[in-house]
Image (tube, grey):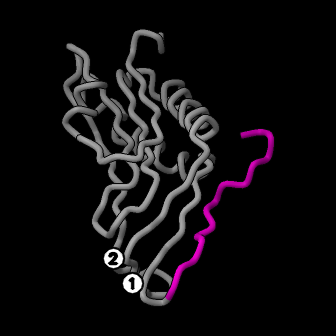
Amino acid sequence: MTDTFPTFCIIADAALDLDALAAQITRPTTGAVVIFTGIVRAVTSRGDSHETDHLEYEAYAPMAEAKMRQVADEIRSRWPVVEGIAIVQRIGRLDAGTPTTIIACAAAHRDTGVFDAARYGIDRLKEIVPVWKKEVGPQGEEWVEGHYKPTGKD
């Protein structure tokens, strides 16, 4: 069944077009598209408050995209009504205010779990997709450790 529904898992180094992305995962039966977009914060107030000028993302695309496909497969197994899925992670230098990550899920109706599916997608991406992030600001630069720790079971 997953072959009949569009799925896009991409590491991108260029700006993203949300309208084009939504169009890629929309089918004639689609009535809802939920899009989560992560944005580079200029000011972080959680934990140690600090400013950020930009982030620098790196990834080994073949490995990261394979893990993104795993996330898409997990979404489909939990929410079989999801018609289309897009998972996109930007890499390179991203200034404050720039979208970094997009999770988009399409379904026939908004009340079929499509919001939960998108939320699961971003949470799972943060857990298992190997992407490295360096935060640069007035205080200097620092590689930010994520939650991904390969276990062989992911």
In the structure shown, which secondary structural element does the residue marked by tag 1 occupy? strand
Is 60 included in the stretch rendered in magenta?
no
Q: Residue at x 44, y 87 (%)?
A: 49
**Mark 1 neighbour class, 10 Å CA radius: few under 14, some 14 to 19, many 20 or more:** some
Is 144 included in the stretch rendered in magenta?
yes
Magenta segment: 140-154
Say whether disc 1 or disc 2 marks the residue closer to the N-terminus: 2
Q: Amino acid at mark 1?
A: Glu
Left/right of residue 129 with respect to residue 113 in the rendered view: right
Left/right of residue 20 with respect to residue 55 in the rendered view: left
Decide which of 73, 60 is in the foreground and name it: 60
Q: Residue at x 39, y 29 (%)?
A: 85
Decide which of 44, 123 is in the foreground and name it: 44
Left/right of residue 111 with respect to residue 131 in the rendered view: left
The image position of residue 28, as x and y in percent, is 20, 13
In the structure shown, which secondary structural element does the residue marked by tag 2 occupy? loop
Residue identified by numbered label 1: 51
Q: Main secondary structure of the magenta part?
A: loop
Tell me how far mark 1 sits from mark 2, CA to CA: 6 Å
Decide which of 79, 104 is in the foreground and name it: 104
- Whether residues under marks 1 and 2 lie with C-beta atoms below 8 angstroms apart, the answer is yes
**Quick one: quadrant of the C terminus?**
top right
The image position of residue 88, as x and y in percent, is 42, 41
Residue identified by numbered label 2: 42
Q: Is residue 43 shown above or below 41?
A: below
Q: Is residue 141 shown above or below 36?
A: below
- Disc assigned to residue 145: none
Q: Is residue 31 shown above or below 64?
A: above
Q: Residue at x 25, y 23 (%)?
A: 26
